[in-house]
Image: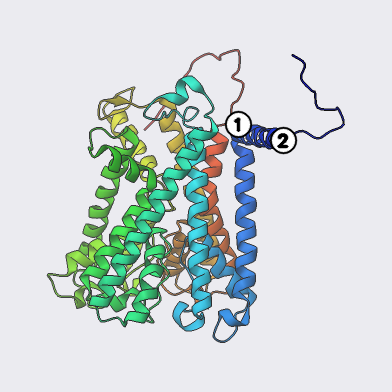
Amino acid sequence: MVTARQPAGDAAPAEVAARRRFAASAASLRRLLRWPRSGALLLALAYALLLAVGTLVLLAPAASTAGATAADAFFTTVSAVTLTGLTTVPVQEHWTLLGEGVLAALTVLGGILYLVGATVVLWLLGRRLGMRDSGMRRLFRGVPGIGEVLGVVRTVLVAAFAVQAIGAFALFLVMLAADVPADRALWWGPFHAVSAFNNTGFALPDAGYAAFADDIPVLAVTGALAMLGAIGPLPLALYASRRSFRRLPLDARLILLAMAAVLVGGAVVLLLGEWANPATLGAEPEWRRPFIALFESSARTTGFTTLDPAAFREESKVFGTGLMLIGGAAGSVSGGLKVGTIAVLAIGLFGALAGRERLSLFGRELPPQAFRHALAITFLFGGAVTFLGAGVVAASHAAPLDALFEGVSAISLSGWSVCQAPEAGAWERGLLITGMLVGRFGPILLVLQMARIRRQPATRHLEDSIRFG
């Protein structure tokens, strides 16, 4: 049988051309996924575009009540996109409904960008960092296919949007019960749900979240959203699918236990320091003080507070700076040192005191490089905190401890504030912006650097030792 052939000069059929375009796009995506640094560059460009667009929109006359300066618009945009929550102007008084909507949109986009980018990058680099997924597929199959990557992204997006949607509805109901007008609760519910889950901490009431100090349901829902955001979508999705703590991977179990320990430990420290302070917990009935302390501890990564941090005792401010440095899970929206990093350091510490050469937890042995990576991240992050804190103290006219508190809040993306940002000068604001950017992107850049494939030296040196103690 003779079949007609397509003339050489004719274009390929539409179906064939579409397949070729899809194959070319798939090949480009595969090449991109092979080089996480290229993906990080695209993520950085997306953030830069978001910062530029957000600043321009907030500068529009309709976005503010009395006109926003470029410095205030840029500072607020950086704070929203990096999910920090520090602000140089009162949110409710300065921004109109359009401006508040822009802040909510920047918060959602900043959170989704980081959740997707960090989760995929950490998953792709799991084998190089001494971690493996529960199915051990990365150990044998190397770089995943497009379907697997899209599956991870879909899981992250579904979990994140589902929690925020449920939280928005729950906050709407409890705010109605707290006598918030229906039209206001219809906006405040979704806004604060987004702000809580993404650990941003923008609050719309004039008095901040202190306006809900007597409304335990509002605080309970907000604190739960903040904790879920700090835990991250993947551990939540794993627990929802397996419904058993013992069946969870080691990383997820460690995250849940560490977050519970930090929640209780932070509340205990706050109770000890502020129980009798009439300007903070001392003004609350005794039966409500433990709950307020638990809320403050749960919201430490968001900046939501029913108390005035400026009225904390000096020792509480010192403990507060340390508490802000403890973040959530790797791949979550929170900043600071990840609880997994701190847990690995603690395991290594106890192992060294016990004279153990190998580190193990829950019947699983940790890879040797896990402790080295945790130590490197902690050391470099501590150095960044030290230099930034010293710079903010030098540039600020506030008391040194207050200035340090604000600087640590910026680099840890906590958002707790002693109200120094509105009075900060140009140099101090610049340092706070630098701190927010370093706190957002520094840890993931360190992970990319440590995960680079390097040629190991072919020779070994003579073994020697040094003295300790």
Taking the spot 77% from the left edge, 33% from the top edge, the residue there is 12
Percent coordinates x, y for residue 318 in the rendering:
35, 61
Can you tell which quarter of the image residue 366 is in?
top left
User: Which label is found at residue 398?
Assistant: none
Residue 304 visible: yes
* Other residues around mark 1 within 10 Å, as few (<14) / some (14–19) / many (≥20): some
Q: Of the residues shown, which amino acid type is indicated by label 2?
A: Ala
Q: Which residue is mark 1?
A: 34
Q: Is residue 395 left or right of residue 369?
A: right
Say which of 348 and 150 sits in front: 150
* Other residues around mark 2 within 10 Å, as few (<14) / some (14–19) / many (≥20): few
Q: Of the residues shown, which amino acid type is indicated by label 1?
A: Arg
Taking the spot 58% from the left edge, 59% from the top edge, the residue there is 434
Q: Is residue 305 depicted above or below 294 in this figure?
A: below
Say which of 371 and 116 sits in front: 116
Residue reaching furthest bottom?
66
Q: Which residue is mark 2?
A: 17
Q: Is residue 106 depicted above or below 155 in this figure?
A: below
How many dots with numbers? 2
Percent coordinates x, y for residue 55 in the rendering:
62, 69
* Distance (Cα) linking label 2 and label 1: 26 Å
Q: Is residue 255 left or right of residue 273?
A: right
Can you tell which quarter of the image residue 26 is in?
top right
Per the image, label 1 sits on a secondary structure element best described as helix
